[in-house]
Image: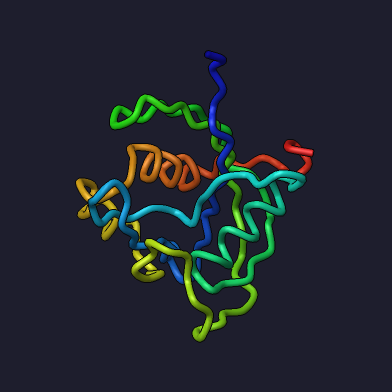
């Protein structure tokens, strides 16, 4: 059997000191996460981030940078995820758009509200990458080609 990590993207969107998050059902639990998902065939990482954000939140965004590229092995299933996390600014919202299966709602939360929900985050990466973003960790978009 050949080992291969799952390629995923996530997006950090901040507005008025609040982060756009998804409240979703995953592995039988209700959890918070950045808008995130898997790379589709014939899609760039940037295209995937824009698409996943729209599908999970109803928000159209413009990518402005990259916070990080991380590996995470989920203890629940042993799968390793290779995740690129983008920074984006919100452009427009379609409140009538149906969100992806499993998404309960898109919510704007402060950093403090996220810390208070630490036990309800999908993975440790959810808060870790926001903390890296808050330290002004930024890379230009062209770092991912």
Give x and y (percent) for residue 38: 56, 45
Tell me which residue sits at (33%, 40%) in the image.
Answer: 123
**Quadrant of the snapshot with the C terminus:** top right
Rendered residue at 30%/27% (across/down): 75
**Which residue occupies the extreme top position in the image?**
1
Q: Residue at x 62, y 53 (%)?
A: 49
Residue at 74 percent across and 48 percent down: it is 43
In the rendered image, the vertical position of residue 72 relative to residue 34, given as above or below: above
Outermost residue toward the bottom? 96
Coordinates of residue 81 in the picture (x, y in percent): 49, 32
Q: How is the image coloured?
A: rainbow
- For the image, the number of numbered tags is 0
- 90 shown above or below 67: below
Whether residue 61 sits left or right of residue 24 in the image: it is right
- Looking at the picture, tell me which residue is in the foreground, 71 or 41: 41
Q: Is residue 5 left or right of residue 20?
A: right
On the rendered structure, is 125 left or right of 8? left
């Amino acid at each position: 059997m050949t080992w291969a990590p799952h390629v995923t993207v996530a997006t950090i969107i901040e507005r008025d000191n609040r982060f756009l998050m998804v409240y979703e059902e995953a592995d039988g639990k209700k959890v918070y996460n950045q808008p995130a998902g898997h790379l589709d065939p014939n899609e760039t990482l940037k295209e995937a981030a824009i698409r996943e954000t729209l599908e999970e939140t109803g928000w159209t965004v413009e990518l402005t940078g990259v916070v990080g590229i991380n590996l995470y092995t989920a203890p629940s299933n042993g799968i390793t995820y290779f995740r690129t996390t983008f920074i984006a600014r919100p452009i427009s919202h379609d409140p009538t758009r149906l969100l992806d299966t499993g998404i309960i709602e898109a919510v704007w939360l402060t950093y403090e509200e996220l810390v208070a929900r630490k036990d309800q985050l999908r993975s440790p990466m959810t808060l870790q990458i926001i903390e890296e973003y808050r330290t002004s960790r930024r890379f230009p978009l062209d770092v991912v080609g």
